[in-house]
Image (spheres, rainbow, N blue to C red):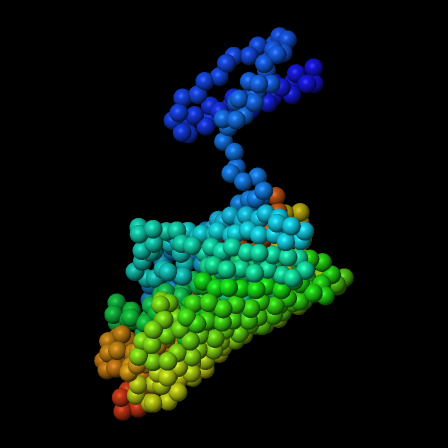
Amino acid sequence: MVWESSLKVRLLAAAAATVLAGALTGAPQSARAADLGGDCCADLEERIAELEATTVRKGNKKVTIELYGNVNKNILAWDDGVEQNTYVEDNGYKTSRFGLRGKAKIVNDWSGGYRLEVETRNARSRNLDQLDDDNADDTLGSIATRQSYMFLANKNYGELRWGYNESPKDNINKDTHVAGLIVDTMHQDFFFNNNFFLRTKGIAPGQSLSNVRYQDLERCYSTSSALFDCSTRRNMVVYVTPKWFGSKDTNGLWFNWGWGEDDIWSGSARYKEEWSNWKIGAGVGYENFSDERVNNAGGGLAGFKQNLQEWAGEASLMHKPTGLFGQFAFSTSENNSSNAYGAFTGKHLPTEIGWDVSVGIQKKWWDLGNTTIWGGYTHTQDAIGFGLSSTSSVGIVSAGRLPTVGVATEATGDEVAKWYFAFDQEVIAGAMDLYIGYQHVTSDLDLVDSALNPVNVDFYDFDLVFSGARIYF
């Protein structure tokens, strides 16, 4: 009877799959009836084999496939000093995304595979401003590729990747944080007001909106992203070493090195470890750019010679019995390109410097999961982004971009500071995090006119509160 029951299950499964395949393909399917209540027919095995042969199967049984991702949506309430509003958006610190990982064993300790990952960009927080509570991606296509590469791996020799993947320096300020997934809620970058326009004081509120965005005062020399997000994903060859000296597979010391595009190379070192009472995480990375069209790729002299150098790193420590933790991160961007001189002053562009410090506590006070409460301070200096691809007007803020300034000026420096607090509640049963946070941002911009006279401009502060949920799958 056990054998007969097994045949029944197999026959029903094969028949169901056959009907489904027919429905999907539009092709008619036929199946001969079988008397499951009586004695087994002599040709039952043959019938089952015929049905199983028509079912939809995975193309390659040797490759294992993993589907993963997360959805991260929040409500943002903001105040730019004149206007207040509330948006529903996608959290830019950890955008909603999904991906596929495929892996197959080749021989002994060798394996190969691929990774494909995309993100949705509907109302992405880093793209919104006072005039746009959606963004162009909502109507022109809201899917973007995040990862698309192949790899060859060996547990003793490491992993080689080629394709569109993370630069070795990418996320160096985030992925060794001892408090784990709270960086998916918020970290150093200014992703909630990145694209907002600054409001100038000393003018009627309705005329105070400038044509200068916060990203113009927070950006790296290599990209329009904020200073703590200089590195990104690029078409590169990347080598990742095995982890050494670790107490388990996820801990230890490892190095990444990569090269790609025209020409960008990067290297980094990371370390994670934990003992009975302590957890530690640290990383440092370097990236060099000689691609004149680094933001759009394509190479070519473009009228100047590019030479950008960027460093970044992080260190964090947690006392496990109490859950208390602290973190420090830094980021620099140096421009040694042949055009890296202010159009009016003739001075070399300053080195951009950013640093962030935070403290908090993470404890499992109830069965839901970890509760994390933390706060900190982020400071960026001289992260100016005006005319960086020009050979004659580097640093120039054209007349009228600031409502109170009617002449062209040169930006010689700036400061942006952010105070922040946040709360994150893990919900283990739902693979979810609930969060709420507050940020207060102040800005200052140093300007001179063509006669090198100082030009003073005051900006309103920016306040925001965000609250939402993130679920993993």
Q: Is residue 388 above or below residue 99?
A: below
Residue under the point 43% across and 62% down:
192
Task: Name the residue at the right extreme.
Answer: 276
Can residue 131 be seen in the rendering of this structure?
Answer: yes
Quarter location, residue 363: bottom right
Task: Name the residue at the front extreme.
Answer: 107
Image location (x, y in percent) of residue 368 = 63, 47
Image location (x, y in percent) of residue 431 = 58, 46
Q: Is residue 432 above or below residue 236?
A: above
Tell which of 9 and 42 is nearer to you.
Answer: 42
Decide if residue 295 is on the left or right side of residue 50.
left
Decide if residue 64 is on the left or right side of residue 296.
right
Residue under the point 48% across and 75% down:
288
Residue under the point 42% across and 79% down:
307
Tell which of 84 and 348 is nearer to you.
Answer: 348
Give the quarter of the figure containing the N terminus: top right
Quarter location, residue 323: bottom right
Tell which of 409 and 321 is nearer to you.
Answer: 409
Can residue 413 be seen in the rendering of this structure?
Answer: no
**Number of numbered tags placed on the structure image:** 0
Q: Is residue 251 above or below residue 106?
A: below
